[in-house]
Amino acid sequence: MDRLETMEMFRRVAEMGSFSAVARQANVARSVVTRQVAALEAHLGVKLIARSTRRLNLTSAGVAYLEKCREILDLVEAAESDLAAEGQVPRGHVRVSVPFSFGLRHLTPLLLDFGARYPEITLEVDYTDRQVNLIEEGVDFAIRITGRLAPLEVARRLSVCRMLVVASDDYLRRRGEPKRPEELIEHECFGYVPTAQSSWGFVVDGELRWFPIRGRLLANNGDALLDAAIRGIGITCAPSFIAAAAIAAGSVRPILTGHALPELGIYAVFPGNRYVPRRVRVLVDYLAERLGPEPYWDALPLFGVDAGG
């Protein structure tokens, strides 16, 4: 029995909660996975996993052993990675999940440039607004844009995401311009599903308050909502990384600029408290450097003031 290989197999089963899922990821038969775990249990003389028809649960011994497995496997991976990195350029395969609009608009050029700088690293990029299961789907890290990370989520902040309320001059001429968040209910506002479909949040006296909106269009894609605003159909609340180019072109303009919207963070989120290989660290460092605390798209005139002076 290859002890490290069997420990890694057990860790995957424990984290994914399924023999079949691990088998699919490893491209082996389910029986191979079950035999390895059974052999490990026989070697240790204890039950690690309580099996039932519906789900797998770790025994108390399994929980304790899993923590030790993680420590040992991470130490081995770190030692091998650091040794292999001596005098060598980073190499290997990195799988990353990125939000659709943000990925297409801003990450694709950066990833292409990164690939030119590090030709020994291959990139597999999943463009999706779905929150992927990093462990189950074998993703090295995901780019997530959020105001609040999940408890115990392991992440590195890469940049800031500012939100803007925008509309076209044509719409504002026809319907008037709202001056306070309370007036949004009188307008055609496009809701982002599922997080902002019936209300938008503004910071009032240091606290987040939600103001109701209504409209005939709901969508889970910011580009679609911005396009509707450009066409003069209504008002949308958009991240600056989506709205910047349209504002610079004069297609829409910010409104309610005297009322602050909460900022979001742009994060690299990792699959649990695992060792991060050098090839992944290099990519995350590169993205943090290129995006920065003041991202380049916010240098465009967004808030009614030309950032260039």
Image (spheres, helix red, strand yellow):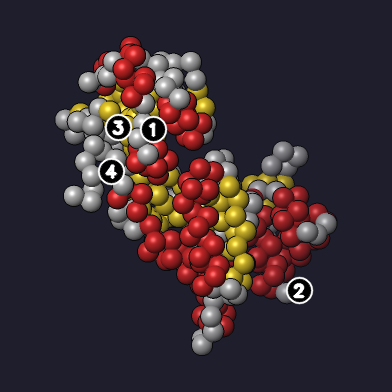
Cα gap from disc 2 to disc 3, whole angstroms: 64 Å
Residue positioned 39% across, 61% down in the render: 290
- Mark 3 or 1, closer to the camera: 1
Q: Is residue 122 above or below residue 229?
A: below
Image quadrant for the N terminus? bottom right
Tell me the residue that label 2 is attached to: 1
Q: Which circle marks residue 254 in the picture? A: 3
Q: Is residue 237 above or below residue 36?
A: above
Q: Residues within 10 Å of mark 1 (few under 14, many from 20)?
A: many
Asked whether, in this view, residue 83 is left or right of residue 308, the answer is right
- Disc with the residue nearer the chain's start (2 vs 3): 2
Asked whether, in this view, residue 277 is left or right of residue 150, the answer is right
Residue type marked 2: Met
- Disc with the residue nearer the chain's start (4 vs 1): 1
Q: Secondary structure at mark 4?
A: loop
Look at the numbered discs 1 and 2 and tell me whether their residues touch, using CB distance below 8 Å. Answer: no
- Disc with the residue nearer the chain's start (2 vs 4): 2
For the question of whether residue 290 can be seen, the reply is yes
Tell me the residue that label 1 is attached to: 251
Tell me the residue that label 4 is attached to: 301
Position of residue 276 measured from the top left corner of the image (x, y, whole percent):
50, 66
Look at the numbered discs 2 and 3 and tell me whether their residues touch, using CB distance below 8 Å. Answer: no
Residue type marked 3: Pro
Residue situated in front as seen by the camera: 23 or 243:
243
Residue positioned 16% across, 30% down in the render: 205
Cα gap from disc 3 to disc 4, whole angstroms: 10 Å
Cα gap from disc 4 to disc 1, whole angstroms: 13 Å
Residue positioned 34% across, 53% down in the render: 295
